[in-house]
Image (tube, rainbow, N blue to C red):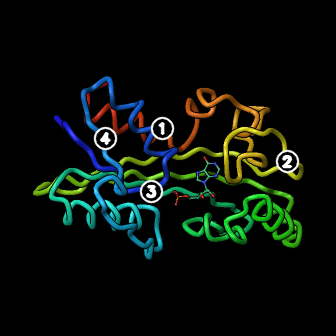
């Protein structure tokens, strides 16, 4: 059983999410920053490749179990873009500008099918063991007008299948019940902690 886990992220929100989720199992969570571990560049072309790059690099440096994730929004009419570039797609990481860019690119395709999905891949690297991946996906569509103040990133224009609300109109627990990250985390808990 995993007793300690380094989260290969400098995003405090993600680290808190892992702390909350894993504290009932007696797992001590460390952030990469707490251990003075570097930020690893996402140079891969798939979510799994980027998650693996980060988890493997920090496991090699620390010789301890490491978890990394990579996620993003894939829009069918844009051939899967922004995908692994979802964070960089937003000018200056400003997601209001990122959403405007997304909507204007979608308008310019002339395609009225705005189907999209979010994906999240978690990579767990325990030294001397093969890397393990947990993947979550949520299908939905992009809407023309932003709705809601919750969440982050592209949440105000993403409506998951089976819902009338955008991710930004949902509570944290409503979102995580259906979200790509929630699904990947539940798979991780099932496999690693028999939950
Ligand atoms: P990363 O996984 O931290 O590299 O972030 C990927 C990017 O994908 C984020 O900066 C967001 O733009 C986007 N993204 C990932 N998950 C979500 C989500 O749940 N809602 C909205 N945007 C997301």
The secondary element bearing badge 4 is classed as strand
Label 1 neighbour load within 10 Å: few <14, some 14-19, many 20+: many
Separation (CA) of disc 2 from disc 4? 35 Å
Q: In this view, does 52 lie to the left or right of 77?
A: left
Q: Residue 183 carries which label?
A: 1
- Going from the N terminus, do you reach mark 4 or mark 1 first? 4
Residue nearer the viewer, 129 or 171? 171
Query: Quick check: is the Cβ at mark 4 less than 8 Å away from ligand 1?
Result: no
Separation (CA) of disc 3 from disc 2? 28 Å
Query: Quick check: is the Cβ at mark 1 less than 8 Å away from ligand 1?
Result: no
Q: Mark 2 points at which residue?
A: 146
Residue nearer the viewer, 187 or 41? 41
- Going from the N terminus, do you reach mark 4 or mark 3 first? 3
The secondary element bearing badge 1 is classed as helix
Label 4 neighbour load within 10 Å: few <14, some 14-19, many 20+: some
Viewport quadrant of the C terminus: top left
Q: Mark 4 points at which residue?
A: 29
Residue at horizontal 69%, vertical 61%? 75
Separation (CA) of disc 4 from disc 3? 13 Å
- Going from the N terminus, do you reach mark 2 or mark 4 first? 4
The image position of residue 89, as x and y in percent, is 67, 70
Q: Mark 3 points at which residue?
A: 10
Residue at horizontal 28%, vertical 51%? 124
Of all residues, the one furthest to the bottom in this rendering is: 43
Q: Is residue 187 left or right of residue 56?
A: right
In which quadrant of the rendered view does residue 57 lie? bottom left
Residue nearer the viewer, 71 or 27? 27
Residue at horizontal 88%, vertical 66%? 107
Q: Is residue 188 left or right of residue 115?
A: left
């Amino acid at each position: 059983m995993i007793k300690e886990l380094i989260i290969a992220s400098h995003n405090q929100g993600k680290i808190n999410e892992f702390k909350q989720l894993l504290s009932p199992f007696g797992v001590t969570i460390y952030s990469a920053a707490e251990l003075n571990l570097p930020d690893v560049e996402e140079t891969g072309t798939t979510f799994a490749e980027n998650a693996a790059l980060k988890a493997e690099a920090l496991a090699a440096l620390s010789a301890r179990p490491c978890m990394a994730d990579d996620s993003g929004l894939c829009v069918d009419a844009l051939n899967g873009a922004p995908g692994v570039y979802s964070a960089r797609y937003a000018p200056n990481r400003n997601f209001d500008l990122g959403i405007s860019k997304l909507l204007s690119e979608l308008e310019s395709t002339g395609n009225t099918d705005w189907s999209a999905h979010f994906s999240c891949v978690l990579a767990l690297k325990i030294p001397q063991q093969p890397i393990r991946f947990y993947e979550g996906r949520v299908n939905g569509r992009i809407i023309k007008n932003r709705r809601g103040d919750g969440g982050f990133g592209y949440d105000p224009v993403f409506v998951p299948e089976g819902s009338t609300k955008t991710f930004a109109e949902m509570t944290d627990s409503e979102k995580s019940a259906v979200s790509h990250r929630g699904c990947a985390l539940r798979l991780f808990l099932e496999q690693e902690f028999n939950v």
